[in-house]
Amino acid sequence: MNFNFERLNRQKEEIEALLKSYQGVIPNKDLIEWRILNENEEVDNLYVQNKTLFISDNIMVLKGVDGRTEKWEIKKIYPIDKKDQKINELEEELRKLKEMINNEYSKPTSTVRKSNKSNADANGNVESKSETSGECISE
């Protein structure tokens, strides 16, 4: 009786070991591997056994075992504290104000010359007058 129990226990352990080894071979449809992409690697030329997400500094590529790929451009975002955020906002506001001031001074201005129509005096002499005004016109 004891001999049969030991034999069954060994068979159970062997079956469990076989199950564990098969679990590693059977692909899990929900499993996605991820990998950092080196500069000289091209995702299209890489073989994958499971759906794999490749990530580099500016791109993310999901490649399936069938070779199809989906690509996204990515941008690194670094954490910023509230003080730095406020400094950035103030610097941007200052830049906009400087731009407005520079644009105001760079606008061309011109002097307008007004010309009155000729007036004849009582003797019939014609006199023409012209005036320069201090008005500026922005173009």
Image (spheres, rainbow, N blue to C red):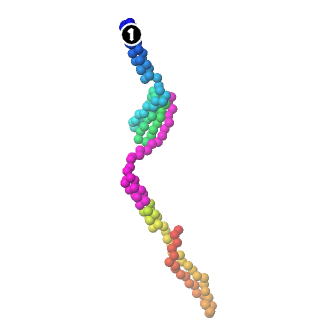
From the viewer's perspective, tell me whether residue 87 is left or right of residue 135. Answer: left
Along the line of sight, which residue is nearer the eye, 54 or 80?
A: 80
Q: Position of residue 30 (x, y in %)?
A: 48, 30
Q: Residue drawn 63% across and 91% down?
A: 124
Q: Residue at x 40, y 58 (%)?
A: 90
- Mark 1 is surrounded, within 10 Å at the Cα level, by few (under 14), some (14 to 19) or many (20 or more) other residues, namely few
Q: Quadrant of residue 32?
A: top left
User: Residue at position x 56%, y 84% from top?
Assistant: 129
Whether residue 79 is situated above or below residue 1 in the rendered picture: below
- Amino acid type shown at disc 1: Phe
Residue 77 is one of the magenta-drawn residues = yes
Taking depth in this image into account, of 81 and 70 the one nearest to the observer is 81
- The residue identified by callout 1 is 5
Quarter holding the N terminus is top left
Please identify the quarter of the rendering in which residue 17 is found. Answer: top left
Q: Nearer the viewer, residue 75 or 42?
A: 75
| SS assignment at label 1 | helix
Q: Which residues are magenta?
A: 66-94
